[in-house]
Amino acid sequence: MGESAFAGWLIGRNLRARLFLMLGILGLLPVLGAVLELAAVQASREDQATLDKAIEGSVYLERTNGLLYSVLMESRGVFMSADTAAAAPFAANLLKNLDALKDVETAWRDNATDAETSGLAELSRRLDDFMTFRREIVRLAQEESPAAARAYSEKEAIKAVRTAISETLQALARSSEEEIKTARARIAASGRSALIGLIGLALGSLVTLGVAALFVNRLLMRPLFKIKTSMLKLAKGELDLEVFGADRRDEIGDMARAVEIFRLNDLERNKLTHEARLLSQFNAWLQSCKSLPELYDMVGEFVTRLLPRSAGNLYVYANSRDVLENVRAWNGAPAPSIHPDDCWGLRRGHAYTFGEHEIDFKCSHVEKGHEGVYCCLPVLAHGETIGMLHLDFGAKRLTGAGAIDADVAEQRRLGILCAEQISLAIANVKLRDQLRDQSIRDPLTGMFNRRYMLETCRREFSRAERNSQSVAVLSIDVDHFKKFNDNHGHDAGDIVLRSVGAALQSSFRDEDVPCRYGGEEFVVILPGSSLEEATRRADAVRADIEGLSVRYLDAALPRVTISIGVASFPSGGDTIETVLKAADEALYQAKEKGRNRVEQAAAPANSDLAAWIREADAAERARSEAARPERAEAA
């Protein structure tokens, strides 16, 4: 297995397997060292045993030579003895030495080395001949005479045996010396081999330890430190990072993938937190809106932030409920108004996503060439559909029939949340406008009521004082109004009041403020108008009302006329009370002079009338506050 193949195999294992493999290799090193040491000791023992045998063979060789020498000396004693009796001690020693020689030869053969076996076999045969000849010499010396023994010993055969024994012993001596030399060389070589093996084992251990340290550092410590760094950055909120080792197939890879999951969860959590914060801000701003146009502008700003990758339009039902007007568009051109039947979402009463199902039908208000995914979200408030939120996700969002991608689903979810916020905000603004209209408008004529008239007077008088302008006030009363109620009923009187109110509203400018002061009395505020100009306009209104034809129950009512008193700020007084008193006094003058006429105020009103006006204003405000809960419940 090559280095690259081994590296690939090692990387393919899990971290536990690699650690166990490295620990196993490190654990085998002492065992290998012990095995090598035991092998060296065993080899040394075997070589020492061989050396000991070789040395023991040398000892046997020396003893054999010594005994042979003793035999020869005793044989010479036998030869040189004068008679048998004198030769007897030498013969006895000779036989004793022969027995000892036989014992030494036997012991040597039993403990011989492989190299000595053949030589000892040859020596044994020759010693047998030698001992046979020597015993014969002893016999001749004992039975005949030492001279006969000497004569026998001088035979060539006996000399040849002695010579052969000497040659065999010399060969054995050389063999023993060679074996001793070889054994000693082997012992020295075994020692060197053991030393070299131990040195190699030590070097291998160092290399293995280095590889283990490199493995621990590169495959364990370095990835762990990198993952630690990623986790510390993640703890600090740094989510824009790349987690190291997520593609690994070991425990480090599992840890890296876990850290990556934490990072993605934090991203998702931050995203949801950001969306929740934007939706909360969206709701807070929407609840602060005072008018629908302001609300629609805020919707455009926030939806652009929440849904940056989609275009859209906000449609709201017109008052006629037969058409939805486009009130706001973002990330694209505004679309024209649509009919309720043009949208499948409105017709089905719930969110409709084109491209979500295998079979879908396109809404009529969407362009014919459009093939992308879009969503129509009905905007509901208090159980009533008040509009529709249209979101266009683009053609590239399509992923196949019956499927939409996760980004489209996420933006649709946010769109539904936005639609809920928008619906509540629109309903609140409309309810607020309705309540405000109920608090400042007269329910019979639809004109501004006395409360609004007093607020307008305060505002316009302050503005006129700052700009050195004048404000004219018309005090109007329907002539003989009691006769309409008495002769024709209160319904006829209401029709008269509505007709007079409609005439007043259509006869003045947009900046003028016609109000119903109470009963059959009306007040008109004309900002920027002088006393003379107001008088001319009052006379024109009087003439218009005189020409009205009011019908009730298919019959014409008597002619309606009005009397008008005209006063102005600041010439008629410097407060609301004094100006209104001056206008009322002029009105009384018009009635005294025959009605159906216009009179100008001559002087400011007195303090008694001003006090009466304040009391009446307080009473009107109390009635309005008491009626507000009933109007809210009815709305």
Image (cartoon, rainbow, N blue to C red):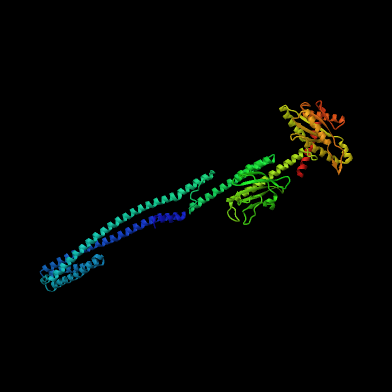
Left/right placement of residue 621 relative to residue 261 reads right
Left/right placement of residue 495 relative to residue 60 reads right
Q: Nearer the viewer, residue 561 or 167?
A: 561
Left/right placement of residue 619 relative to residue 36 reads right
Callout count: 0
Q: Quadrant of the N terminus?
A: bottom left
Q: Residue at x 18, y 64 (%)?
A: 170
Q: Is residue 57 visible?
A: yes
Q: Identify the residue at the far bottom of this view.
A: 143
Q: Nearer the viewer, residue 576 or 373?
A: 373
Q: Nearer the viewer, residue 127 or 488?
A: 488
Give the vertical position of 386 relative to 560 (above or below): below
Q: Quadrant of the C terminus?
A: top right
The answer to which image quadrant residue 631 occupies is top right
In the rendering, at what x and y percent does residue 473 appear? 78, 31
In the rendering, at what x and y percent does residue 527 appear? 75, 31
Give the vertical position of 89 relative to 605 (above or below): below
Give the vertical position of 78 relative to 353 (above or below): below
Q: Is residue 112 visible?
A: no
The answer to which image quadrant residue 28 occupies is bottom left
In the rendering, at what x and y percent does residue 301 appear? 63, 42
In the rendering, at what x and y percent does residue 432 appear? 72, 41
